[in-house]
Image (cartoon, rainbow, N blue to C red):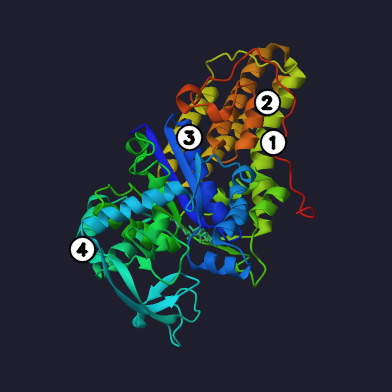
Amino acid sequence: MSDAFYITTPIYYVNDVPHIGHAYTTVAADALARYNRLKGRNVFFLTGTDEHGEKVQKSAALQGLQPRELADRVVTRFQGLTPALEITNDDFIRTSEPRHYEAVTKLFEISLANGDIYLGAYEGWYCTPCESYWTELQLLDGGLCPDCRRPAEKRSEPSYFFRLSKYQQPLLDFYKANPKFIRPDARRNEIVSFVEGGLNDLSVSRTSLSWGIPVPGDPAHVIYVWYDALTNYLTALGYPDANPGRVDTFWPADIHLVGKDIVKFHCVFWPAFLMSAGIAPPRSVFAHGWWTVEGQKMSKSLGNVVDPYEMVRTFGADAFRYFLLREVPFGKDGDFSRNSMIHRINADLSNAFGNLLNRTLGLLGKNFGGVVQQPVPGDPLDAALAARAASVVDAVDAHMNELEFSRALESVWELVDAANKYIDTTEPWKLAKDPAATARLGTVLYNALEAARICVLLTSPVIPSAAQKMWAALGCDGFVASATLSASGGWGGLKSGVTLEKSAIAFPRIEEEKA
Ligand code: ME8
């Protein structure tokens, strides 16, 4: 396994208002970035905003602004997600930046020079909100866009085309040679049949708008937003030459995380653009599912858009992050409801996990003045708990490698439950009454806290602030975010002799009325 790990979110449309879908991709990517840092890998994690195109140009005009001014004003909504959701992205790219113009121009020039991009004429049905052209056959009855069901308009314009047809077989060969390039499998099957069905050349320039990156040598055209947007993943590494070494270290990207609606762009167009330029396609694209809200599609008109900032204010970033990744198997669709969120937080975080730590710290405070005792080995119950911890570390790793966040968290909770059960079985409150059992009591409390420490380490990518609080409450040094599994993931890492507080409230219970 290479030491470098490059993960990206899609770049978000800058004039949208952030919602649960944006938060979801970003939080999942962050958890994966943090987990890979925990494994000691050299991580580069990118997010950012997609700023060109007709929608931005039109809404800027409506507000009497230049598109760039509008983008500068609204980009803070997305940049603000980083502190609010405790995201650890290494860069935030904006497609309106000069570095991005350079990268897109360079990539486009290579394909122009080798004949993969050529000038032609485009006729078709255009849907402005979706920024997509459709063929007559694809339109729904009444000339409606098959994606958003709004009317499409007939357009004809000179256009540069990308010779996508030439890449049909190379793409199919690539999918075959890289069975994990598209995950989950359902998405892979859709893409393979789409490409098998034949590919038409793709229009990659527009003359109908000006807010975009000009076609090199023909500035009456601007480059198609998707060609522009996808290239962000290379720009951020310094492509073509601003940061020598970074591209070599991090490209091909390990994972582009996307929603299921934009798989075609990432799995068909993007690898073809790259192949044409002689650049390796990304290693993998993972498409997550779609959130509905209380059983309904989320929409501004229904007024049910879940605002991530409000979630964080009400529940805290840890709880929101935990819910998003625990509630729904990654890749499947899910439904958001405040009640299920409150239930999850209280049951898993406050009760099971919080309780493990607090009851043990309480007993340690009462019986040993909070001083962690040196454990005495030999009891099979203790060895079983230690073995369970080791198998959970392995299970979490296997699940995280497959982006099975919910199963990874389920595995951690097996250890939380095993540790709670260990306490119930060893009955430290009874040991406390027997003066001859002091050493055993100290050992039992040590083991329960040690299991909690490993759970803290394993959940730190998902609930970073709570994990840090618990890490400190367990007397561990420094930041859990700087810890590694190799140095801290083994049994016995808890220090004895340190004095701990009697309690640590990492997960306050959520009262239903408050929420
Ligand atoms: O697509 N549930 O940007 P975007 C889950 N600029 N995910 C959702 C969702 C929902 N209800 N609604 C949206 C773009 N998403 C382009 C990307 S990348 C080179 C260019 C997801 O702001 C959606 O699938 O519309 C996408 O992954 C992301 O939110 C942002 O989409």
Identify the mark nearer the N-term, 2 or 3. 3
Q: Where is the N terminus found, in terms of image quarters?
A: top left
Q: Which mark is residue 473?
A: 2
Q: Is residue 174 visible?
A: yes
Kind of residue at disc 1: Ala
Q: Earlier in the sequence, mark 4 or mark 3?
A: 4
Question: Residue 304 versus residue 454: which sits nearer the camera?
Answer: 304
Disc 2 packing (10 Å; few <14; some 14–19; many ≥20)? many
| Marks 2/1: CA–CA distance | 10 Å
Q: Which residue is mark 3?
A: 392
Q: Position of residue 290 (x, y in %)?
A: 51, 61
Q: Nearer the viewer, residue 70 or 44?
A: 70
Estimate how packed mark 4 is, as few (under 14), some (14 to 19) or many (20 or more) residues with alpha carbons within 10 Å. Answer: some
- The quadrant holding residue 431 is top right
Chain-order first, disc 4 or disc 1: 4
Q: Amino acid at mark 4?
A: Lys
Marks 1,3: beta carbons within 8 A: no
Disc number at residue 166?
Answer: 4
Task: State which mark lies toward you, 2 or 3.
Answer: 2
Horizontal side of 169 relative to 486 (left or right) equals left
- Between 130 and 450, the one lying in front of the other is 130
Q: Secondary structure at mark 2?
A: helix
Tag 3: amino acid: Val
Mark 2 to mark 3 CA distance (whole Å): 22 Å
As helix, strand or loop, the secondary structure at mark 1 comes to: loop
* Residue located at (62% from left, 53% from top): 77
Q: Residue 381's spot in the image, x, y percent? A: 54, 25
Residue receiving disc 1: 506
Q: Decide if ligand 1 comes within 8 Å of the CB at mark 1.
A: no
